[in-house]
Image (tube, rainbow, N blue to C red):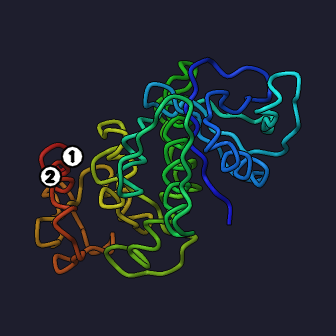
Amino acid sequence: MSRIILQPIGKNITGNAFIEAENTSWGQKEKYRDIWENSIGDTILFIKNRIIIAIAKIKDIEENYEINIDYPLRYIWNEDIEYINIPLEEINKIVGYKLNFSPQKHQLIQKDNYLIDKVFNFLDKFKTIIECKNIENKKELTETEIETLIKLRIGQSKYREELINYWNGCSVTGYENKGLLIASHIKPWKDSSNMEKLDVYNGLLLIPNLDKLFDRGYISFNDNGTILISEQLKDIEILGLNKKMKIDIENEHKNYLEYHRKNIFK
């Protein structure tokens, strides 16, 4: 089972290796050595001031007696180290306990595969947010091009997978062909906080015509899940709409739907 190792650091990361903590006590030295000797393939999260600043996967370890014979191990990661900016508190919420660190003392997340998968999914979604923000900041793109690229990126992400697992088909019609279903935020991406962008309750899975109508504010849903159809929309039957349409919602959906009704719905 691949582990996640959280390693506080006091300095910036340089090169492709980080020497294990020189402050490790004699009582912890063997435990430390066992962890790093068996760490190839593990993911390491570098922590500074309670912020996760970088992610890397350990590809090798080596002896380095030139540094300190009592602490000879260091670990080496691949060249694709990713620099990010995620508060450690967000990981604490996922693992269900508070991760506290003394200087240079690592911690492991290894309770079970399910917990580790949840952390990896969170990290993947957060990186998707960063990628989409980079798209938004490209001044040479039009608004339509930005929206298209972002929806394409979201469509390939873990977020869409979570919506598929949650809804098991179109949120309204139940249609199950995943290739035609679109992941749609209830509270729009541009108006959502980072955590709201990741929240499965802020998402619907819709067939293309419903996605477009919802995105443009021609339909919405009340707190019972019943569809609301804008009076500006004519010939609703041609669009495949009827006033009996409904989605199954939880309390967690209601704040997002309220935002959509107040700010998007026409």
Q: Amino acid at mark 2?
A: Arg
x and y percent of residue 169 in the render?
Answer: 43, 78
Q: Please state the total of marks drawn on the protein image.
A: 2
Q: Is residue 221 left or right of residue 57?
A: left
**Which label belongs to residue 168?**
none
Relative vertical location of residue 56 with respect to residue 141 in this rendering, above or below: below
Q: Residue at x 38, y 44 (%)?
A: 90
Q: Amino acid at mark 1?
A: Ile
Judge by depth and name the residue closer to the eye, 60 or 179: 60
Relative vertical location of residue 202 with respect to residue 105 in this rendering, above or below: below
Secondary structure beneath dot 2 equals: helix
Q: Residue at x 44, y 25 (%)?
A: 49
Secondary structure beneath dot 1 equals: loop
Judge by depth and name the residue closer to the eye, 171 or 129: 129
Other-residue count near label 1 (Cα within 10 Å), few / some / many at <14 / 14–19 / ≥20: some
Judge by depth and name the residue closer to the eye, 32 or 129: 32
Other-residue count near label 2 (Cα within 10 Å), few / some / many at <14 / 14–19 / ≥20: some
Q: How far is disc 2 from disc 1 in space, using C-alphas?
A: 6 Å
Which residue in the structure is indicated by mark 1? Answer: 264
x and y percent of residue 2 in the render?
Answer: 68, 60
x and y percent of residue 96 in the render?
Answer: 35, 58
Q: Please state, as top left, top right, bottom left or bottom right, where the N terminus lies in the image.
A: bottom right
Q: Is residue 100 left or right of residue 69?
A: left
Where is residue 27, by image quadrant? top right
* Proximity of marks 2 and 1: CB atoms separated by less than 8 Å: yes
x and y percent of residue 264 in the render?
Answer: 21, 46
Q: Residue at x 53, y 55 (%)?
A: 109
Q: Is residue 54 left or right of residue 142?
A: right
Judge by depth and name the residue closer to the eye, 45 or 265: 45
Q: Residue at x 53, y 47 (%)?
A: 123
Relative vertical location of residue 187 with respect to residue 143 in this rendering, above or below: below
Which residue in the structure is indicated by mark 2? Answer: 261
